[in-house]
Image (cartoon, helix red, strand yellow):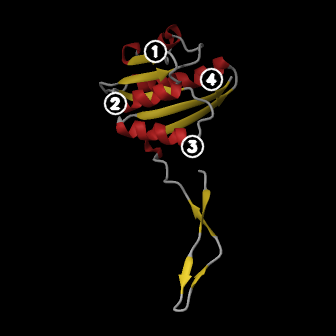
Amino acid sequence: MSIYTKRTQLALFDQQAAKPLPLVEQVIAPAPLNTDFCSELALSGQPRQCLALLAPMLKALSEQQEQRWLTLVSPPVELTRQWLKGTGLNTERTLIIYPKGLQSSQELVCQVLGLGRSHTVISWLNLVAPAARQRLAEAAQQGNAHSINIAQSW
């Protein structure tokens, strides 16, 4: 959470004259992030090992008894439809999408989350800034979905 300062000048008045006080710094904390809708998972290691860790989670999410999609946005090239089928994932309830044109993956994730047609949107966005996390959380809350970002270093 980032904290920033705001400089304000306070004035104190008495009956004779206005006397300005010296500048005072106030610490203002940003509104807390609603983390009920967002999670982040950091993975490092060989791609095969990381995918082995993801497989059970993806399989469980694809089997939810919900009429909405499990959506994967810009997954790594190692995560193919063939690999997903091999893990037992329900491919009939899973979408894999990529941004088009100048759209960023983050913009696409926010759009998909906000639509509410996916119960969970998994993204591979590295180094998500606090402002971007806030946008993801707001979009997820709007669509009553869960956002899972996987930060990877493989």
Q: Position of residue 120 (x, y in %)?
A: 42, 29
Q: Residue at x 65, y 21 (%)?
A: 49
What distance separates the C-alpha of mark 3 from that of mark 1?
35 Å
Is label 3 or label 4 in front?
A: 3
Q: Image quarter for residue 17?
A: bottom right
Question: Looking at the image, is mark 2 or mark 3 earlier in the sequence?
Answer: 2
Mark 4: few/some/many CA within 10 Å (<14, 14-19, 20+): some
Mark 1: amino acid: Gly
Mark 1: few/some/many CA within 10 Å (<14, 14-19, 20+): some
Question: Looking at the image, is mark 3 or mark 1 earlier in the sequence?
Answer: 1
Q: Position of residue 128 (x, y in %)?
A: 59, 36
Q: SS class of the residue under badge 1? A: loop
Q: Which mark is residue 88?
A: 1
Is label 4 or label 1 in front?
A: 4
Q: Which mark is residue 116?
A: 2
Question: Looking at the image, is mark 4 or mark 1 earlier in the sequence?
Answer: 4
Q: Which mark is residue 130?
A: 3
